[in-house]
Image (cartoon, rainbow, N blue to C red):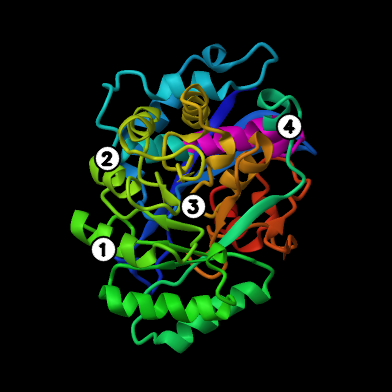
């Protein structure tokens, strides 16, 4: 199996929404296609990848460093014992001459290419990625379904409480049992009104609601929100502080009995390990949201899962950020705790296969080779432009 071409484009994911930190009106994503010499049904196998929402397209890094390194590597140096491309060897080639630390945006660029490589390898052996991962790394044990929750509740211009509740109701009507909303862009008092309105819709069951501050708070504000949320029984209180500032997380965990969630903006195994060492998180309840598409890809995510195991954490505590098919395949194949979903935002990259319904908060994977991008028509249309 050899790489014959690598192509990339920049695609918009612009949306008239905002969280507590940024708006998404100018957001973009990189999309790559890695063509190989393997032929299936008379056509070369092509793997596709893209970066998750919240980070911009990485055209410069891809074109100046990572695509040339991957394209220029000796073909035999990228092959495993079965003749397939080895994503770990490809990862090493891409990271050659990179200093440790300072992960920044390069982790996103490498993650885009890593996703495309895994898509190509699974297509080459004509199996879904979730099945390939289960067979390679999980003793063949893939989950029958994955728990997914609907992420939304963004701040729209002119959006009032009624529209906010209607949005959440629409997710319930589509089969989700748990929803997530943004907090932190208005006052604590106003946010509590928004939370209470959604809880009323959910029959007062806090287990069906998560809230996300997107790293907005200082220590005092984060603690104040924690005290206000204490006792509501929320599914989780997400990313209250800057993701790399571990001490506030530890201080909050010492007094907030509920579930905390964070990690979507940590982009390496080393940063994840520092969170586990110094963030005060509790392996019996808290949720880790590392996104493989943003954090050097699945090769690095496997290292992160091994680190977590050594520190006494179950893979079931991992619920990846991003709401994309790559993370969903990983969740099913490696036995994670579930996956984020974006039913209405970040099109066409958010969401899953067109014909795969959510039932009672769970989703069943299609039996499509690779990651399954071909089963999502709007996204496949974008990818066809660089096939």
Could you tell me how far apart the alpha carbons at marks 4 and 2 are, in whole angstroms? 48 Å
Regarding mark 4 in the picture, which secondary structure is present there? strand
Q: Residue visible at 61% across and 47% down?
A: 328
Taking the image as shown, residue 199 lies to the left or right of residue 195, namely right
Assign a secondary structure to mark 2. Answer: helix
Q: Which residue is mark 1?
A: 224
Q: Quadrant of the N terminus?
A: top right
Do callouts 3 and 4 mark residues in contact (Cβ within 8 Å)? Answer: no
Between the C-alphas of marks 2 and 1, the distance is 18 Å
Dot in front, 3 or 1: 1
In terms of secondary structure, where does tag 3 sit?
loop
Q: Nearer the viewer, mark 2 or mark 1?
A: 1
- Whichever of labels 3 and 2 marks the residue nearer the N terminus, that label is 2
Residue range (magenta): 113-132
Cα–Cα gap, marks 1 and 4: 59 Å
Q: Position of residue 167 (x, y in %)?
A: 53, 79
Reading the image, the residue beneath label 4 is 39
Q: Which residue is mark 2?
A: 246
Q: Quadrant of residue 213?
A: bottom left
Label 3 or label 1, whichever comes before in sequence order: 1
Q: In terms of secondary structure, where does tag 1 sit?
A: helix
Mark 3 and mark 2: Cα distance apart in space: 22 Å
Residue 179 position within the rendered picture, expressed as x and y whole percent measured from the top left: 54, 66
Q: Which label's residue is closer to the chain start, 1 or 4? A: 4
Disc 3 crowd, CA 10 A, few/some/many (<14, 14-19, 20+):
many
Magenta: main secondary structure equals helix
Q: Quadrant of residue 244?
A: top left
Judged left or right of residue 128, residue 54 is left
Q: Residues within 10 Å of mark 4 (few under 14, many from 20)?
A: few
Q: Nearer the viewer, mark 4 or mark 2?
A: 2
* Alpha-carbon span between mark 3 and mark 4: 31 Å
């Amino acid at each position: 199996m050899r790489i014959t071409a690598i192509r990339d484009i920049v695609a918009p994911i612009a949306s008239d929404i905002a969280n507590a930190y940024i708006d998404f009106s100018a957001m973009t994503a990189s999309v790559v296609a890695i063509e190989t010499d393997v032929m299936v049904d008379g056509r070369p196998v092509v793997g596709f990848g893209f970066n998750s929402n919240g980070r911009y397209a990485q055209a410069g890094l891809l074109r100046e460093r990572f695509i040339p390194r991957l394209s220029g590597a000796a073909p035999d140096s990228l092959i495993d014992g079965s003749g397939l491309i080895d994503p770990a060897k490809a990862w090493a080639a891409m990271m050659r001459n990179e200093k440790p630390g300072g992960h920044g945006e390069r982790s996103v660029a490498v993650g885009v290419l890593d996703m495309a490589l895994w898509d190509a390898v699974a297509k080459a052996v004509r199996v879904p990625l979730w099945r390939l991962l289960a067979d390679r790394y999980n003793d063949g044990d893939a989950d029958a379904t994955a728990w997914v929750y609907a992420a939304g509740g963004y701040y729209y211009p002119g959006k009032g409480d009624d529209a906010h509740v209607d949005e959440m109701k629409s997710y319930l009507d589509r089969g989700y049992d748990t929803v997530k909303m943004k907090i932190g862009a208005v006052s604590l008092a106003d946010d509590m009104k928004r939370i209470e309105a959604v809880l009323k819709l959910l029959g007062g069951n806090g287990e069906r609601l998560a809230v996300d501050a997107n790293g907005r708070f200082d220590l005092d504000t984060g603690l104040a929100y924690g005290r206000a949320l204490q006792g509501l029984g929320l599914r989780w209180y997400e990313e209250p502080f800057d993701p790399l500032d571990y001490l506030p997380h530890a201080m909050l965990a010492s007094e907030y009995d509920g579930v905390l969630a964070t990690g979507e903006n940590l982009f390496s195994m080393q940063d994840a390990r520092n969170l586990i060492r110094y963030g005060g998180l509790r392996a019996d309840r808290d949720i880790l949201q590392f996104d493989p598409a943003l954090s050097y890809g699945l090769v690095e995510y496997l290292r992160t899962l091994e680190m977590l195991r050594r520190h006494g954490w179950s893979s079931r505590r991992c619920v990846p950020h991003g709401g994309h098919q790559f993370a969903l395949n990983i969740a099913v194949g490696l036995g994670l705790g579930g996956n984020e979903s974006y039913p209405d935002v970040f099109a066409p990259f958010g969401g899953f296969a067109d014909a795969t319904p959510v039932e009672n908060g769970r989703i069943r994977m299609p039996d499509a080779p690779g990651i399954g991008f071909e089963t999502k028509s709007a996204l496949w249309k974008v990818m066809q432009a660089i096939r």
